[in-house]
Amino acid sequence: MPPIEIANVSKTYRHAPRPALSDFSLTIQPGERMGMIGPNGSGKTTLLRLILNFIRPDRGEIRIGGDANLERARQWIGFVSERQEGMENFTPRELLNYAARMFSLSRPQRVAKVEELLDFTGLREVADELLGGFSKGMSQRLQIGLALIHSPKILLLDEPMSGLDPVGQKDVFRLLQKLNEITLVYASHNLEEIETFCNSVAILKEGRLVKKIQLSQLSREVFTLEINPADLANIRFPKHLQAVVRSQDEHTVLVELEASASELQQFLQLLHQAGVQIRRLRSRSKLDELLSL
């Protein structure tokens, strides 16, 4: 049974010029780590709100573990939002206890779960300190702990790395990598995060699903080579690299091609043997190209 099934869902906000989501369908499989990417206004936040039953669709249906009653199914979902406010005067232990009570955990369950999550998030040493003195990374680790208090089967993350410094990002990634048995939906603008953490990606644009792909299919990157115009005639580009001259003047030629790491290495060796000098080499993810579709 898929953890999340979204079938022909549409949602339009009052006075909006166009639908936030339009005839949107998507299925997420057990254990999948699905990234959601797209420009502002593409429908990512609306989709998360619909899954959480914070808002209702105009048309279509959403099922969580086969259950169309989303209020009941929300017990299987944890949620980490981009921003959290109003918790500065509480401690991690207080908030975890409060969350456990909200989910009606018995006292023994509550004590055990709070202790487990203090260890998991690495916050035991500051368990009784006020959040007002915490870094953003520490606060975000606590939010992950709060989202896991009821042992959900699904975890939704909305820009979880926003505002974090490199140390905070590393700590949060370390936590998320441990959640091997939970289905995750990870909304972000950062392609590097998606490629590092997720195994699939859904690309949204103007409320529609442009494409859903497995990241294992994107073994190639797009490379741009800057070379001398005089060298262009001396280069034989293999057909499988799909090389295209993007710009050319009397001083510079920019050639774009697609290659895996090994294919690029082989091609660069051929250029070196032919005496071709590469002035500059740049790369970008295939996801960049897909986002521009």
Image (cartoon, rainbow, N blue to C red):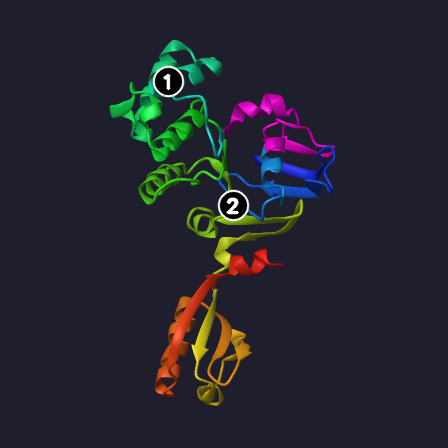
Q: Nearer the viewer, residue 4 or 257?
A: 257
Q: Answer with left or right where residue 221 lies relative to residue 164.
A: right
Residue 80 marker: none
**Disc 2 crowd, CA 10 A, few/some/many (<14, 14-19, 20+):** many
| Residue that label 2 marks | 35
Q: Nearer the viewer, residue 67 or 219?
A: 219
Q: Is residue 1 visible?
A: no
Q: How many marks?
A: 2
Q: Quadrant of the C terminus?
A: bottom right
Q: Is residue 254 visible?
A: yes
Q: Answer with left or right where residue 208 lies relative to residue 268.
A: right
**N-term mark: 2 or 1:** 2
| Residue that label 1 marks | 90
Q: Are marks 2 and 1 in contact (CB under 8 Å)?
A: no
Range of residues picked out in magenta: 49-78
Residue 263 percent coordinates (x, y): 42, 72
Looking at the image, which residue is at 43% across and 27% down?
A: 148
Task: In the rendered view, tell whether residue 92 sits above or below residue 31.
Answer: above
Q: Quadrant of the N terminus?
A: top right
Q: Is residue 73 magenta?
A: yes
Kindly state the secondary structure of the residue where label 1 is placed. Answer: loop
Q: Is residue 154 magenta?
A: no
Task: In the rendered view, tell whether residue 277 sits above or below residue 81.
Answer: below
Residue 40 percent coordinates (x, y): 59, 45
Residue type for callout 2: Gly
Residue type for callout 1: Phe
Task: State the separation of the CA atoms marked 2 and 1.
Answer: 32 Å
Looking at the image, which residue is at 37% across and 30% down?
A: 139
Closest to the camera, between mark 2 and mark 1, is 1
Residue that lies at the very extreme toward the top in this rendered image: 107
Residue 27 percent coordinates (x, y): 61, 42
Q: Nearer the viewer, residue 32 or 247?
A: 247
